Image (cartoon, rainbow, N blue to C red):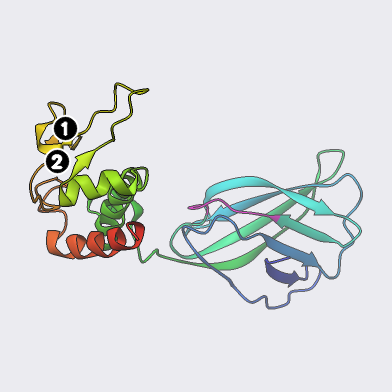
Amino acid sequence: MNAVKRKVWVLEKEWVKPIEIVKSTDAVPIQITIVDYMIPEGTTAAVYALARGHTANASMLAEIDADSNMITFTPEAGFFPEGPCGLQVRMTGTNQRNLVSFTIPVLCHKDAVDDEGEAENPTLISQILAQLGVLSQKIAAFTEMTNQEMDIIFNGGSIGGDDPEDPEIMTGDYNDLENKPSINDVTLEGALTGAQLHLYGDADDMQSEALEDLFSSVFQKISK
């Protein structure tokens, strides 16, 4: 099991290596094994994140494995305050009496990325991924077209054939159609560029030339 593991002594004072964690971590359990004290059956344990001055910043219940003499809990993001702090473990017996309480030093590192700031000011990579997501949906629409339809739209030509059993399919020049297909409310006629079809979102989001090159390479693959 992937976990931060520490061994502690409660009857004798022994040095314990500080727990190091990043503030946003919320999927890594912390396992504490008590070396010199047998945890009685029916014991419950609570853990407290201690800020400077030994005031409780947050608390939660922990799981106890009496057979292994082990206490396990998974702190949520922000459970520990940034900087040097502490973890207090308090075990209570079936009679609600405090059995054992001990502390372990903790060093909580600040996040290098501010999630709230990222949401308000997305990075260039985030903008590119967002634009690629929109572009992939539009490319998917092209993949649903037949080769004949794409040939007509981009190279000109005629639609359908002389099929008397299907009167809705008529032979004629594409330019003579009254209801031509469109993309983003732009009618597909003539030599239109990706920018004219609004395939790239706002001009400020991303350089259209970069996306046009990407679109052209992808379209060449799907049109083969």
Question: What amino acid does circle 1 point to?
Answer: Lys
In which quadrant is the N terminus drawn?
bottom right
Residue 176: x and y in percent read 10, 32
Give residue 188's mark. Answer: 2
Question: What amino acid does circle 2 point to?
Answer: Leu
Report the residue marked by disc 1: 180
Q: Secondary structure at mark 2?
A: loop
- Residues rendered magenta in the picture: 73-79
Looking at the picture, does residue 93 appear above or below residue 82? Answer: above
Does residue 110 appear to the left or right of 65 in the view shown?
A: left
Closer to the camera, 34 or 54? Answer: 34
Closer to the camera, 55 or 156? Answer: 156
Residue 149: x and y in percent read 27, 43
Question: Which residue corresponds to the image point at 20% horizontal and 60% vertical from the top-left?
Answer: 211
Closer to the camera, 178 or 127? Answer: 178
Does residue 118 appear to the left or right of 184 in the view shown?
A: right
Q: Are marks 2 and 1 in contact (CB under 8 Å)?
A: yes
